[in-house]
Structures are given as structure tokens and as C-alpha cells.
Image (cartoon, rainbow, N blue to C red):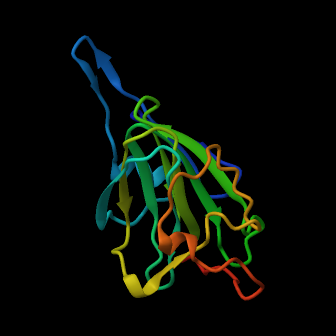
Amino acid sequence: MSKRFSFTETPLSGLVKIARKPIIDKRGFFSRFYCAEEFKEIGLESSIAQINHTLTKKKGGIRGMHFQYQPHTETKIVSCLQGEILDVAIDIRSGSATFLQWHAEILSAENRSSLYIPEGFAHGFQALTANCELIYLHTGLYTAEKEGGLNPLDPKLAIDWPLEVSEISERDSTIPLLDAQFQGIVAT
């Protein structure tokens, strides 16, 4: 059992909410952000290969829903360092009982939570406040030619974005809507 984290399973198998357990005193707090040994409890055996940092300036802005195809599938651990987001993961594992179902968690600087997103999920978020900063830990290196995405506004996904969309990239908004050709990906 982890001393620095609590791990909570979500309705989508393998998708886990992580809460950091800070040590708080009059100076502020100390919390562990990642621990390879403790994250083995939730199935993370791969090492972290890349760490990315984003800023979304506008409240209501959406980024996502992104993933990588084989052989570059990756696990992500997403945390909000400033502001508050609705973080969304969609099960795109071919043959999964929860294929194309989504789950969302509110991540914020205040709640010190992260979302562990295993291989086989698309990921994106909506900024619930202005100036949201996120940090992503990835088990794989970004490979542009293996990048995939789902349109975050696709009615077949029916993601319940809580705010009116204030901005979205052209790339994300022009991803074709789902059709019968999309069979998902095989996660390793």
C-alpha cells in the first residue's frame, strides 16, 4: 500500500485516479509526484520517457482527444499544476467491453490529483479556469506519424463538456467524426 499516493479505480479498467498525499507544515507542503516503485501497484512497469508541460490560457479551451498507434502506444500520467481542468479519457482498446466509453475527473492544483491513463486510451481536457498548466509524464516518445485523434466534439462520443468551448485547435476540430471503420487500437 502506497504511503505517498492513493489510487482509485475508475469505471474504465486500468484508468486510475491518483491522489498525492502531501506532508503539510507551516512552511507549506511536500508531495511526491511520481515513484516508480509505488506506481507498480497500478501496473506501470515502463519507465518515463518524456515529460511535457502545457499552458491553456482561455477558460473553456479544449485540447485532445489524442493517442498514439502501435508500436508507439503510451501510458500517460496527467497532472494540473495551476488552475482546474476536466480531464477526459476514452477507452479505444479494440475488443474492450467499455470501447468508446469515456470517464472524466477534475484535476486541479488544489486537489493534487492526477489521472493514470494506460495504453489504449485517447486523452484530452477542457480548461475550467484561465491559465491552466499541466504536466504529462509519458512512457513513450512522441512519434508524429503514429499520432491519432478523436474529434472532441463528436456526437457519437457525447462528451459532456461543462463549459461552452472557447477555443479548440484546427487540427482537433477537423478530425473526422467516428464511423464503422474505426476499430480502436491494440494495447500491449
Q: Picture coordinates of residue 146 (x, y %)?
A: 45, 85
Seen as rendered, the residue at the extreme left is 27
Q: Residue at horizontal 25%, vertical 11%?
A: 26
- Identify which residue, 2 or 66, lies in the foreground: 66
With 55 as the anchor, is 121 left or right in this view? right
* Quadrant holding the C terminus: bottom right
Dividing the picture into quadrants, the one containing residue 40 is: bottom left
Q: Picture coordinates of residue 177 (x, y %)?
A: 69, 77
Seen as rendered, the residue at the extreme top is 26
- Identify which residue, 28 or 158, lies in the foreground: 158
Q: Compared to 44, does 132 lie above or below?
A: above
Q: Picture coordinates of residue 61 (x, y %)?
A: 50, 52
Q: Is residue 42 visible?
A: no
Q: Compared to 17, does 140 lie above or below?
A: below
Q: Is residue 137 visible?
A: yes
- Identify which residue, 173 or 89, lies in the foreground: 173
